[in-house]
Image (cartoon, helix red, strand yellow):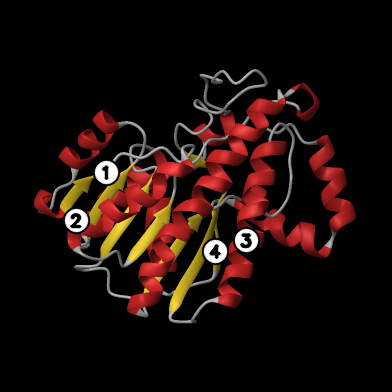
């Protein structure tokens, strides 16, 4: 896929992987629609883009407010009269033990990460199908392939994305591509903003995150996967090999992850 002049809608574009993707895709000549809840931060991201800012539009949205997403989608399509590719990068993480996590917090994580993504997809997909072309990119996580400590609801939301989009891929015209991206430890503010047991933010960065792959390198790997139309890609350091360990040596994987200090 040639990125130049493609209309790409990025959710979660105000920070982290979404922000890094915005900069790289702008450099490649894409026309961008940037979305998140934080309008002011989106304008900061836009101001940092180096190429034609007339091809960058700000469209705030709240993934938790699923009832609003059809209207937001209609607004997105009107900007350039099309959306060639949507990157679902919006979401929230978790750092709390399962039994200590308030059920409302777990439900909120599912609502943002899973239901918001599903609702937005169901709003944009009919347009893509009518044009017989399109690409849906879902930013999942390695914990969408296995579970670890302190991430029960987050991992569940990412597992759910895999089930939904793997199934959706079998139901739609193969001209509509679906790519699921599974980052590992990427140096972003995701752990700072992660929800704790009572729903408050953690407000600190995990050591593994601080030492993780820079977001800009992660963005480059994601763009390569998009261009190659890969169905599923793992991005990160040695932690990505845990997917293979879980698949081929599940008993050993279980022992290791139980004993591991996961941060």
**Mark 3, other Cα within 10 Å: few <14 / some 14–19 / many ≥20:** few
Q: Position of residue 219 (x, y in %)?
A: 39, 53
Q: Which comes sooner in the sequence, label 1 or label 4?
A: 1
Q: Is residue 233 above or below residue 93?
A: below
| Local SS, label 3 | helix
Q: Which comes sooner in the sequence, label 3 or label 2?
A: 2
Q: Which comes sooner in the sequence, label 1 or label 2?
A: 1
**Mark 2, other Cα within 10 Å: few <14 / some 14–19 / many ≥20:** some
Distance (Cα) linking label 3 and label 4: 17 Å
Numbered tag placed on residue 29 in the rendering: none
Do the residues under discs 1 and 2 have CB atoms within 8 angstroms?
A: yes
Do the residues under discs 3 and 2 have CB atoms within 8 angstroms?
A: no
Numbered tag placed on residue 79 in the rendering: 2
| Local SS, label 1 | loop
Distance (Cα) linking label 4 and label 2: 30 Å
Q: Nearer the viewer, residue 120 or 245?
A: 120
Numbered tag placed on residue 164 in the rendering: 3
Numbered tag placed on residue 59 in the rendering: 1
Distance (Cα) linking label 1 and label 4: 28 Å
Query: In percent of the image, x 43 and y 66: which residue is there?
Result: 125
Numbered tag placed on residue 233 in the rendering: 4
């Amino acid at each position: 896929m040639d990125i130049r002049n493609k209309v790409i809608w990025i959710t979660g574009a105000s920070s982290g992987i979404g922000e890094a993707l915005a900069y790289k895709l702008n450099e490649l000549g894409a026309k961008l629609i940037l979305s998140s809840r934080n309008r002011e931060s989106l304008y900061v991201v836009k101001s940092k883009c180096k190429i034609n800012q007339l091809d960058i539009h700000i469209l705030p949205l709240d993934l938790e407010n699923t009832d609003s997403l059809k209207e937001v989608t209609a607004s997105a399509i009107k900007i350039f009269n099309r959306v060639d590719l949507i990157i679902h990068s919006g979401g929230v993480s978790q750092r709390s033990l399962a039994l200590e996590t308030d059920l409302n917090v777990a439900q909120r994580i599912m609502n943002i990460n899973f239901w918001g993504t599903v609702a937005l997809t169901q709003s944009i997909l009919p347009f893509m199908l009518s044009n017989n072309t399109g690409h849906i990119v879902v930013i999942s996580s390695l914990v969408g392939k296995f579970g670890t400590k302190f991430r029960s609801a987050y991992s569940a939301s990412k597992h759910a994305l895999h089930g939904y989009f793997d199934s959706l891929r079998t139901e739609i015209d193969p001209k509509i591509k679906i790519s699921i991206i599974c980052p590992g430890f990427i140096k972003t503010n995701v752990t700072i903003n992660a929800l704790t047991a009572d729903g408050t933010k953690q407000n600190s960065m995990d050591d593994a995150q601080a030492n993780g792959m820079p977001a800009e390198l992660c963005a480059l790997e994601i763009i390569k996967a998009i261009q190659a139309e890969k169905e599923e890609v793992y991005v990160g350091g040695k932690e990505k090999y845990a997917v293979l360990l879980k698949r081929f040596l599940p008993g050993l994987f279980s022992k290791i992850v139980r004993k591991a200090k996961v941060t």
